[in-house]
Amino acid sequence: MMSEEIDWDGLTFSLTPTDTMYLTETSSTEPWMPGTLRPYGPIEMSPASGVLNYGQGLFEGMKAFRTSKNRVVFFRPEENARRMQRGADRLKMPPVPESIFIDAVEQCVQANLRWVPPTGKGAMYVRPLLMGSGPILGVAPAPSYTFLVYVTPVGPYFKGGVSAIDLLISEEYHRAAPGGSGGVKAIGNYAPGMMPSRKAKDAGFAEVIYLDAETHTYIEEVGAANFFCVKDNVLYTPELTGTILPGITRQSIMELARHHGYEVIETKVSAEFAMAADEAFCCGTAAVISPIGSITKGEKKATYGDQKPGPITEQLYNHLVGIQNETEEDLFGWLHEIPQ
């Protein structure tokens, strides 16, 4: 498919195969070296690879935007590089140096520039993957590793754009437990959420909200996104206790909100407190900010703002998207230009 033929308005958050991907490999004892670009397509891997047998793998999610100034930019890519390094330490993989990570995502976007949507029509989603690709039979770190990057143009994550979504609190399933890998972007964190998510969608909800595994009281994450609520003009978000992902959008929203003069509190956020809040939203690279219209827990249902985004949610959304599109000043130096 030629990029000229893409229906930019019809893009959803789904995979469109592009032209080129990036790949590099190393052993557990050698340093990482810059990789090469190759046509997008299948890669060869041992059936005994560590990632296939034991889930020794991590991924990142980031976006490149075509801005109103016709530049192509990343949003805070260094944070993705650092988060992947922390995850590599947790899963006993050799961390990819920040310089190689940034070079890889830049090269991959440059090679696929024709697939970057026009300003306001979506973004190019960039997916770096780090995995134990070498063969290993015992449960142990793989002998060799692959770091690859592929890209795809995407539209909005939630259908219908920035309309409020209905969420269901999961009383039966948990995303992560203390001491586990919930604080890093391990591939194994995501498969167990597919069944609760499907059940919620079948019941008419957009996604599930997970509570903490210890007390079943405090909100942790929304599916694959971070959670915020607003009460009396103060923002609350679950604190980083090792069981939720330290989202880059989450951190950015906290900085933006403080810039606007709002108090932001990282704390344990009980479901009861959240359901009595004035506004609620979830956020992530894929979703950016999605306003929450209602939260259901058992027989109880809390609704927010007549199913419309609340004023603070809307203000933060507009400012964040404005920075990404360069219709607002990049006060924090978050944008990283990709040479065209």
Image (spheres, grey):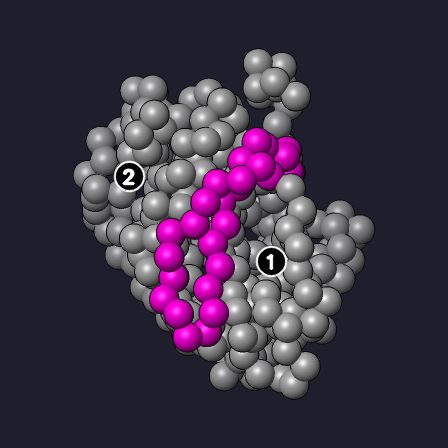
Q: Amino acid at mark 1?
A: Gly
Q: Amino acid at mark 2?
A: His
Q: Is residue 123 above or below residue 30?
A: above
Q: Earlier in the sequence, mark 1 or mark 2?
A: 1
Q: Residue furthest top?
A: 4
Q: Find residue 208 and report its horizontal and vertical position in percent.
A: 65, 58
Q: Could you tell me if residue 177 is visible in this image?
A: yes
**Mark 1 surroundings within 10 Å by alpha-carbon count, few (fewer than 14), some (14 through 19), many (20 or more):** many
> Is residue 295 or residue 208 the one in the foreground?
208
Q: Which residue is mark 2?
A: 336
- The span shown in magenta is 13-40
Q: Residue at x 63, y 33 (%)?
A: 16
Q: Is residue 9 magenta?
A: no
Q: Residue at x 56, y 56 (%)?
A: 224
Q: Find residue 174 and report its horizontal and vertical position in percent.
A: 63, 72
Please state, as top left, top right, bottom left or bottom right, where the C terminus lies in the image.
top left
Label 1's element? Answer: loop
Q: Is residue 28 magenta?
A: yes
Please state, as top left, top right, bottom left or bottom right, where the N terminus lies in the image.
top right
Q: Residue at x 45, y 45 (%)?
A: 36
Q: Which residue is mark 1?
A: 223
Would residue 301 be found to the left or right of residue 91 on screen? right
Q: CA distance from mark 1 to mark 2?
A: 28 Å
Would residue 329 be found to the left or right of residue 36 on screen? left
Q: Is residue 69 above or below residue 54?
A: above
Label 2's element? Answer: strand
